[in-house]
Amino acid sequence: MDFNLVDDAWVPVILVDGSVAELSIRQLLTDAGQVRALALDVPTQVPPVLRLLLAVLHRALEGPVNDRQWHTWWQAGGFDADRVHQYLDQHRSRFSLFDPVAPFMQAGGLEALNGQTKTAALLVPHMASGNNVPLFSPQRDARPEPLSPAQAARWLLHAHAWDTAAIKTGAVGDRKAKAGKTLANPVGSLGQLGVVIPTGPTLWQTLMCNLLPLPGAEDELDLPVWERAPLTAEWNGARTPTGPVDLYTWPSRRIRLVPDEDATAGGVMVRRVVVCAGDRLALGNGQQLRRWKESEPHAAFKRSSNLERKHRFAPAYWPVRHMSDRQLWRGLGPLLTQAQTLSATAGKDAALHQAPRVLSRLGSSVRMAAWGSTPLQILAVGLEYGNQSAVVTEAYGDTLPLPVAVFSAQDSTWRDAVLDTVEGTARAVTALGFLAHNLAVAAGCRPEEEDLLAGHRSRAREQTYAALDAPFRRWLAALTPQTEPETAQDAWARQVRQIVRSHAGALIDAASPAAWRGREIGDGDDKQRIDATVAELRFHSALNKALAELEAPTDPSLPPVAEQAELEAITP
């Protein structure tokens, strides 16, 4: 009974000719140029699988140590197959999924203190299991579908990366287990991150995008889990990662897949599992937080004043997480922050945001020259947790085309143009939100009824953002090195004006007779009249101001507006 990830097919892919296949680690790395993309079960499987491949490459190729070596690999057009084969052969035994002593990313012989196992649904967030019961799950916890070895391998990696927090089953041999369980377990190694991964037209280009220089003298300490001692039930408390390779294969849980010979299914299946507490990231002081940030290349970080006060350490950063109700392009700011090297004395002068290191590195002159006009996309994934992070409430997945010029460390023209465009778009949508707000006030809604007014603003904004989403992605995808930023901004601003005015027209057409009659609000010198006509004038003035920096000349078809009208809600 053996299934080895090195040579057995377990990763579904789409090949460059459009066909689908399942490949082993060896095939993925030696034929990476023939693979268009990973075609996994869910987007959140992509980061742990891709990071596994990166860890193998870093160790097999012993680098890259700098961008010069990276460029040599880029020119070769593929990875050194001999070195990949040699490394995989050397460590092949540690990639056996059901090895009795050292199974891949598992603890051999792991047993729960109560002697029980749980269904394999425990590894799959969208399947009902224990407290995690999705509303419309097609599976019951009592009789979930079994997992093939290939599926089990993918969900095993997913569990280490994204498993829920709180109470875990105590393991035999784990001295930290109390009363048959361990408490205060954090989420998996990626659960606190808004993961961001640049991708190219082929798997080889995607891997090359994500191969960053190793940290130099510490390379021999930065080891993947399969080059360390086999996992056991015992875990040594919180520890600091030794580098990115360590993080890429972080064993945040102790797991054992229970293989079951199933004649009806045609071979080995996994129906039962044991999942217990595992390694925790040490995040208890400022130095540990800094080490985590320096080791994690696939997330943006933001300064936290709370952490700085708590640890008396500045700057202290915490990961930026994706918002499940917001498209990726609406939050580009933290992702495109200029790369900065923080000194130990940076203190309060340090930047508010630190962009994902993998994106900042794309801006080096060597990598930009190599990448040229090759299409680039950004994959963003994450999970939201609820009930003290014990259940998964939302899954986030988005992709966004971006020209490599926006990452340039030498020229910020395109970065500034894209960020200014996003900000101008946000101001235009905000103007529409306040139109909805003012129409509601004119119709009789009291200004102090903020919850109700906030609902009017939010609905108008989200409907407009939904209408802008596809056009904005097309606008981004069409940007080329030959495009003039000012021309591109002007073209987009005109699209925004058209779409936002269309939604404004719908709001005005739907205004009630009471809104057209209007009313007076406020007292004394603050008394003012608000009706649908005033709300519309205010909207057009606000829209002009929102797009003024992007669009020129001013659209002559706009109705006249009062010069002093401002973007504001009518308040008493």
Image (cartoon, rainbow, N blue to C red):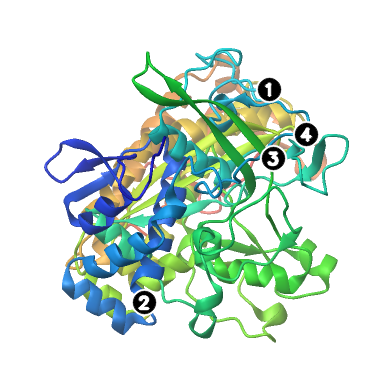
The residue wearing badge 1 is 130
Residue at the extreme left: 17
Specify the amino acid type for callout 2.
Pro
The residue wearing badge 3 is 276
Q: For residue 203, say whether it is visible.
A: yes
Left or right? Give the position of 454 relative to 540.
right
Q: Tell me the mark number nearer the camera, choosing from 1 and 4.
A: 4
Task: Tell me which residue sits at (72%, 29%) in the image.
Answer: 451
Specify the amino acid type for callout 3.
Cys
Q: Considering only order in the chain, which callout, 2 or 4, is on the residue closer to the N terminus?
A: 2
Specify the amino acid type for callout 4.
Leu
Q: Tell me the mark number nearer the camera, choosing from 2 and 3.
A: 3
Q: CA distance from mark 1 to mark 4?
A: 18 Å
Q: Secondary structure at mark 4?
A: loop
Q: CA distance from mark 4 to mark 2?
A: 44 Å
Task: Tell me which residue sits at (71%, 47%) in the image.
Answer: 186
> Where residue 334 appears, x then y in whole percent?
52, 61
The residue wearing badge 2 is 64
